[in-house]
Image: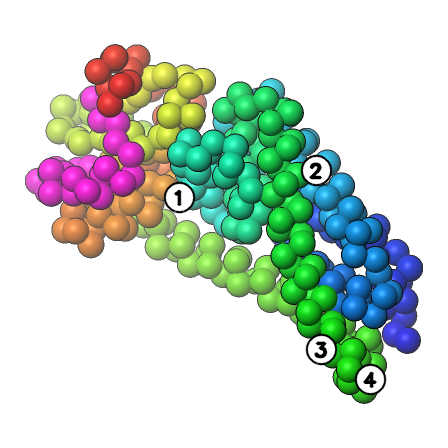
Amino acid sequence: MHATIVIFLHYGYLVLLGWVLLEQLGFPLPSTPILLTAGTLTATHEMSMPSVLAAILLGATVGDSVWFYLGVRYGGAVTRWICRFSLEAASCVRKTEDMLTRHGSISLLIAKFIPGLNTMAAPLAGQSKLSYRTFLIYDMAGTLLWATTFVLLGRFFGDAIVRDPAFLHWLARSAVGLVLLVVIGMFFYRLGRQQAFLRKIRTLRIEPNELKAMMDRGESVYIVDLRHPLDILPDPRVLPGAVRLQPSELIARNSEIPRDRDVVLYCTCPSEATSAKLALTMRRFGVERIRPLRGGFDSWKKEGYPLVDIPNSILTH
């Protein structure tokens, strides 16, 4: 038997636990191939289904609990830090915030099925002041649902190939290599997608000092605050003259957006993912003079430029 398979069979549960833990902590190591491999090995009784699920559950729970408490302690700073290193881009924050706002803790049941959201869900749940007990119940249930789905898929595949000893022998010698190829392929696919997106928005960005200079000159700039309500809680202020709109509102009301002046969008994502995607979308509606603010709200605030308290009329918008 191939040495790598021997290692996996001897330390498979530790490999599962460690791999899932690292993925939940934000490392670009997709767990799906490992879960499928473990499921396949349960068909040959080399691994135990309950032990496989227990290892996955433990790894995911530890990783998610770390992020949950970091979210409680540091709030939005944690998710912004994750965005800086995420291959799924910062739009994951917006998607997860929307899921938690609309569906509450139930959204944790499906978060692990969506790349990127599985890491973002835990710190955002902590930031939203969800109790740890409630978080833990739904997070563990979602982990079991996710793990069982892919392990059973692997088991189904294993039941099919176990009937062919020759193919099973080949798989035993090649499984680890195939898993690594899939993991590497997924990593470079995500990396390529991220880089393609960044190339698109690089020429669109407006620097905070450029926007400040335009405002100082008295130019009429239409500024849109795209931040989610959860992002506003730590600092309920906006750029002077900014209008607060959610991304869906901006698209629905695209005909109201002026075409005769500059439009600047900002959010709290380090890579301006939400603002940049909206800018690209709005350009297709004919809003040509639209740009995302580089660094968003945090960059403007860091420069010490003016901010105003959110009026009640806007806060309840």
Question: Mark 3 sits on what residue?
Answer: 160
Magenta-drawn segment: 241-263
Residue 54: mark: none
Comes first in the chain, label 1 or label 3: 3
Q: Nearer the viewer, residue 79 or 169?
A: 169
Q: Amino acid at mark 3?
A: Ala
Residue at point 69% right, 42% down? 60
| In this view, 214 is above or below 309 | below
Residue 61: mark: 2
Comes first in the chain, label 2 or label 3: 2
Rounded to the nearest angstrom, the CA distance separating label 4 from label 2 is 37 Å
Q: Is residue 248 magenta?
A: yes
Rounded to the nearest angstrom, the CA distance separating label 1 from label 2 is 28 Å
160 with respect to 242 (left or right): right
Question: Mark 4 sits on what residue?
Answer: 165
| Residue 221 in picture, x, y percent from top left | 17, 31
Element assignment for label 2: helix
Q: How many marks?
A: 4
Q: Amino acid at mark 2?
A: Thr
Element assignment for label 3: helix
Element assignment for label 4: helix
Comes first in the chain, label 1 or label 2: 2
Badge 2, how many Cα within 10 Å: few under 14, some, many 20+? Answer: many
Question: Mark 1 sits on what residue?
Answer: 273
Rounded to the nearest angstrom, the CA distance separating label 1 from label 3 is 43 Å
Comes first in the chain, label 4 or label 1: 4
| In this view, 160 is above or below 240 | below
68 with respect to 311 (left or right): right
Q: Amino acid at mark 4?
A: Pro
Comes first in the chain, label 4 or label 2: 2
